[in-house]
Image (cartoon, coloured by chain):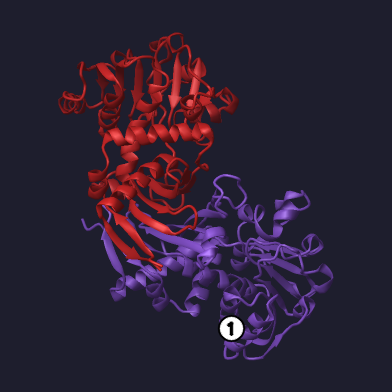
Chain colours: A red, B purple
Amino acid sequence: MEHKTMLLNQSDIKSLLTMKDIVEIVDKTFVGFGEGTTINPTKVNLDLGETASYPDYHGFMNAMPAYVGWEDIAGIKWAGGFLGKRREMGLPYVTAMIMLIDPAIGEFKCVMDGALITNLRTGAQAAVAAKYMHPGKEITIGLYGAGMQGHMQTLAFAELFDIKELRVYDVFPAAAEKFKEDMKDTVKGEIIVCKEPQEASIGDVVVGFTQSKDKFIKSEWIKPGQIVFPMGSYTECEDELLLNADKIIVDHIGQCMHRGALHDVAAAGKLHEEDIYATIGDVAAGKKPVSNPQNERIVCVPIGTGAMDIAVAGVAYKRALEKGLGGSFNFL
Amino acid sequence: MEHKTMLLNQSDIKSLLTMKDIVEIVDKTFVGFGEGTTINPTKVNLDLGETASYPDYHGFMNAMPAYVGWEDIAGIKWAGGFLGKRREMGLPYVTAMIMLIDPAIGEFKCVMDGALITNLRTGAQAAVAAKYMHPGKEITIGLYGAGMQGHMQTLAFAELFDIKELRVYDVFPAAAEKFKEDMKDTVKGEIIVCKEPQEASIGDVVVGFTQSKDKFIKSEWIKPGQIVFPMGSYTECEDELLLNADKIIVDHIGQCMHRGALHDVAAAGKLHEEDIYATIGDVAAGKKPVSNPQNERIVCVPIGTGAMDIAVAGVAYKRALEKGLGGSFNFL
């Protein structure tokens, strides 16, 4: 028996996937969550000094295994973020690798970079979730954070919606100006660079891709008909906004209570699992529809699941196999 | 910056490590558990049909990340076992891969086979634990299961003890006879092939490396002064033996209550975490000594931790680097 494991690097992966692909893959995998064919245990954290006192390395790694039924693939992403020495060296915050197995026999099919796929699927998650919550094809967006994830998510929204207006705020105004230039062909409508955070809060969707823990998105800014997406491991929303939302929708209940936007209110005992209306998967699969979004303030938290990474990685692997791309190694 | 990741296969790893090395590495890592420098979160299981009804693949994978302080290395093993189609294909039960990172910056240093290391370190665990519990250099062993793990653990015991007698029982007598032939130069004393399970129960240590769930090791067989090591994910010991042991010692409390020898009595509410006397690490670090083993019936359960795999993998990686062994790939 042939025991070769395929090896893929970032440029291989980049050449194999478009944002259109990512959006479709993320969509199918959300539906799989709702239908029970996406299996995603709660990730396990190795604290290397992010919060632990030992070892003191200002980083963490998350182990994120998953099985994705619609592709019949299983795998794991081991991914983390490091400040400290890694930042001093000028390396990107995220470090990640993905391994895929044949789920029937456990043979290792592929080892590939996971950082690019992390960025791609994270950008797509809010846009795909919005598809099931925002009525119609036209959309206005308020975006906090004009960095790489801000770019990615705008590409993803442009795949699924006509963006009539995009308001962007960044603590570094130059970053917002650069975003406007980069995205001018992607966004059909106007891109408005905002001087104050509140100015960016009036879109149909309000997306937070900052690293803020200041809870700067105020409850009073958000009106019925708006959907707020606080992304990542940070706390961008005021507690009031979370506690008074008409619906809170998350991608993974186990993971969302312990990290990111909901962490503080959950840790304080103000928000419980039963306060979560549904998972994005439940909504996507039609089990818990969002039927009246015009009259509701919705907060949607896609904290990020390994299943999204494995689903994207699985498609990259299959296409690489068809095209004869990538390296290979026999580990046995 | 150079972004090459080293790749190591089984024969590379085999050429870099002896059982003497493994015993020393496992020992230091146990001590690190006791001293708090071995960081080992509870493993996370992806059920691919071992017990789950979907997907129906008769296998599982465990994600086992760890940081090993004495080596200053972090990594993850993703390992599992498959019956079904994998067994039909004649492949070994265990499938595993290990990834190592620089814990300061999260760069991926090495990807290597994990199956061989799993077997090596599993074999060493009981022998190293016994070093801290059995007085003196001479030892007699009762061994259940004459398979690969039985061979490995005998090699490990021979590194640390003079084996005065080894009694071996296997449900397949031919396997026990082959074991006797294979191990005749390793075991200084006599190897006795037993016809009935009880005949193998009289060693200073009694080690179970079977795949039995029949609880065939009876409480009445085990006398004060004996240490029983039920290894792996099975249930070889009668409940009475577990519940009436003078001391129960495990490698990882979180993991040992949910799988393996203690699973049934823990699940039935008959054994609680506070009934565990100590971890092997506590004993190895001198924090909770076993001072009176001659008068006690001890049950010791090394269920297996990722830290052992990462510690062994870390040494293999550093030696491969020195010797210029292995392949390499740039994943970025």
Q: Is residue B230 left or right of residue B184?
A: right
Left or right: A133 in relation to B159: left
Image quarter of the N terminus of chain A: bottom left
**Type of amino acid at the residue the image marks with label 1:** Ala
Q: Residue at x 51, y 18 (%)?
A: A243
* Residue A73 in sight: yes
Residue B154 lies, with reference to residue A265, above or below; the image says below
| Res. A172 image quadrant | top left
Label 1 Cα neighbours within 10 Å, binned few <14 / some 14-19 / many ≥20: some
Relative to A183, say whether A203 is above or below: above
Residue drawn at (35%, 48%) of the image: A96
| Residue A155, above or below A228 | below
Judged from this view, the residue extending furthest toward the right is: B220
The picture places residue A123, in percent across and down from the top left corner, at: 32, 32
x, y percent for residue B263? 70, 55
Q: Work out whether residue A82 can be spotted.
A: no
Left or right position of A184 against A169: left
Question: From the image, which quarter does the C terminus of chain A lie in?
Answer: bottom left
Q: Position of residue A34 (x, y in %)?
A: 51, 31
Question: Considering depth in this image, is A264 or A37 the residue closer to the camera?
Answer: A37
- Which subunit holds the residue at mark 1? B
Q: How many marks?
A: 1
Nearer to the camera, A42 or A323? A323
Q: Quadrant of residue A141?
A: top left
The image shows residue A104 at horizontal and vertical percentages of 50, 54
Name the residue beneath numbered marker 1: B158
SS assignment at label 1: helix
Up the image or down, A7 lies above or below B141; here it is: above
**Closest to the observer, A198 or B271:** B271
